[in-house]
Each structure stands twice: as C-alpha cells, then as structure tokens.
C-alpha cells in the first residue's frame, strides 16, 4: 500500500479541526498549513498528530498547493477543515489505491450539510470534487475563489461520499456569501466581465430556477427555498460588485 498524505489548510478552525483529523487517523501523514490562527487550531492539530506549518495567506489555491508540496506520501487527499472521511469511504480509498494502475486522481462525492441538515437536491448532492491525486500529478488552479484541482492523466470516481458540514448557522452562511461574492467579482473582472443588465437580472433568475425547479431544490423544504434564493442573490451580488472591483478595491 502506497502512503497517503492528508493536506488541510486552516485559519481559526478550532471547532472543526479535531473531528476532521480524527476521521483520517488511518493516513500515513497529516499536513496542516495554518494561517496564524488566534484560537486553538494549531494545538489541536498537533495533538491529533499533524505536522503543522504556519504561513501567511497566499490565496486559497496557492495555500492548498503549498500544503501539497509539504507532503511526502505517494497519494495526497485534500480536505477542508469542515469535511470528514467516514469509515465506508476510508475503506474504499484503501482498497482502491493499490489497484489504481494509470489512474492519477479520484473524484469524491460530498454529502453537504446546511445548519445540520443533509441537502440532497438543488445541485448539492452528489457534488463530486477532485480531491485525491498522485503526488506531482496536478495542482489547484490559481483563482481567487472556488479553486479547482487539475490533474494530468486519467481520473476515476469513488462510490462513497465524504461529509461536509459547510455552514453551522445562517449568520455563518451570509458572512461567507458576502466574502465569496467579493472574490468572485474579482475573478469576473479578470475575465473582462461587466455588470450588464442581463447579468444583473436574468442570471439570478436562472440561478433560482435551476436550483429550485430543475434540480428539485423544493424537495429540501424551506432550506431548499432559502438556498435557491440566496444563490440567486449571490449571483446578482458577484456581478454587481464588479463595479467595486473595477474601482480598485480589494477583498480579503
């Protein structure tokens, strides 16, 4: 069995990091790159057996690439602090990797929770993301937000999902929506996208329709309705905020 390293980036994740790292104690190595947390994140991570490095912030993609560079295993599993690897997925990973052959990366589904509830519709499940790769086979593309891992070679999919406890409260969700919309506006501006009337009106409407009707978000009850409305608002906000990005404002 080739060694598996787990890479996690953190900043003030004291409420999440213990459960995250407890779910990957089977890994050969755990590397945490911390952005000088002011809570007990670092202490907990070290207590859980992680090798901790503290680095200034370089953006989501660069920070995750830095964490991967510090690993030594033949395979790297990238996790966020609010994610968990349940036993069925752990077993599948350990069973699959010895038979990987020329496969260099694996997509893993995420079971996303919103305020404690598993959201099954609206595009929130299965939400496959590329998280497991051979060391050296790829990197996160440089983007301000919604960074994606790119690999060079064949990829596969694992059957069992990880668990993602993304938002613990409405306040937490709205705070991150504001931050992510600002970062998304910067990305749009880089692509020379502007806040046209079509973008400000039709795109939010289509976002709601896609999530709530096409992807059956209505089956998730009031949470599904809230998410469809808030995603529509996020779509409006990221386009509208390109005017802020154009004026030279930065968002961190």
Image: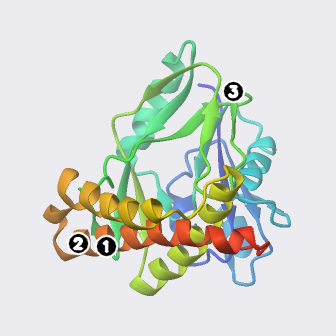
Label at residue 229: 1
Total numbered circles: 3
* x 53%, y 81%: residue: 175
The residues tagged by marks 2 and 3 sit, at their Cα atoms, a distance apart of 40 Å
Q: Quadrant of residue 189?
A: bottom right
Q: Crowding near pointer 1: few (<14 within 10 Å), some, many (20+)?
A: some
56 or 249: nearer the eye? 249
* x 36%, y 61%: residue: 202
Residue picked out by circle 3 = 137
213 or 111: nearer the eye? 213
Q: Can you give x and y, in whole percent of width and height, for residue 223 in the image?
A: 25, 74
* x 30%, y 67%: residue: 228
Q: Crowding near pointer 2: few (<14 within 10 Å), some, many (20+)?
A: some
Q: Can you give x and y, in whole percent of width and height, for residue 160 in the image?
A: 34, 40
| Label 1 SS | helix
Q: Are marks 3 and 1 in contact (CB under 8 Å)?
A: no
Query: From the image, which quarter does the C terminus lie in?
Result: bottom right
- Nearest to N terminus: mark 2 or mark 3: 3
* Residue 22 sits above or below residue 155 on the image: below
* Residue 162 sits above or below residue 18 on the image: above
State how the image is colored: rainbow
Q: Can you give x and y, in whole percent of width and height, for residue 61 in the image?
A: 71, 51
Viewer-side label of 2, 3: 2
Residue picked out by circle 2 = 225
Q: Quadrant of residue 32?
A: bottom right
Q: Are marks 1 and 2 in contact (CB under 8 Å)?
A: yes
């Amino acid at each position: 069995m080739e060694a598996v390293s787990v890479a996690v980036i953190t900043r003030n994740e004291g409420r999440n990091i213990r459960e995250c790292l407890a779910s990957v104690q089977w890994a050969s190595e755990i590397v945490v790159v911390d952005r000088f947390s002011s809570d007990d994140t670092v202490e907990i991570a070290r207590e859980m057996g992680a090798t901790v490095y503290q680095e200034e912030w370089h953006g989501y993609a660069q920070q995750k690439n830095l964490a991967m560079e510090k690993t030594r295993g033949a395979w790297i599993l990238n996790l966020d602090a609010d994610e968990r690897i349940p036993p069925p997925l752990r077993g599948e990973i350990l069973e699959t990797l010895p038979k990987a052959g020329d496969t260099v990366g694996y997509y893993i589904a995420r079971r996303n929770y919103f305020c404690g509830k598993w959201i099954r519709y609206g595009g929130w499940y299965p939400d496959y993301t590329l998280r497991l790769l051979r060391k050296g086979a790829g990197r996160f593309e440089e983007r301000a937000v919604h960074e994606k891992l790119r690999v060079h070679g064949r990829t596969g999919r694992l059957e069992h999902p990880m668990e993602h406890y993304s938002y613990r409260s409405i306040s937490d969700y709205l705070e991150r929506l504001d931050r992510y919309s600002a970062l998304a506006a910067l990305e749009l501006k880089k692509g020379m996208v502007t806040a046209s009337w079509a973008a400000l009106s039709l795109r939010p409407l289509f976002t709601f329709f896609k999530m709530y009707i096409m992807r059956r978000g209505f089956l998730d009850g009031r949470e599904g309705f809230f998410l469809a409305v808030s995603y529509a608002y996020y779509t409006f906000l990221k386009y509208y905020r390109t005017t802020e990005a154009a004026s030279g404002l930065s968002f961190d």
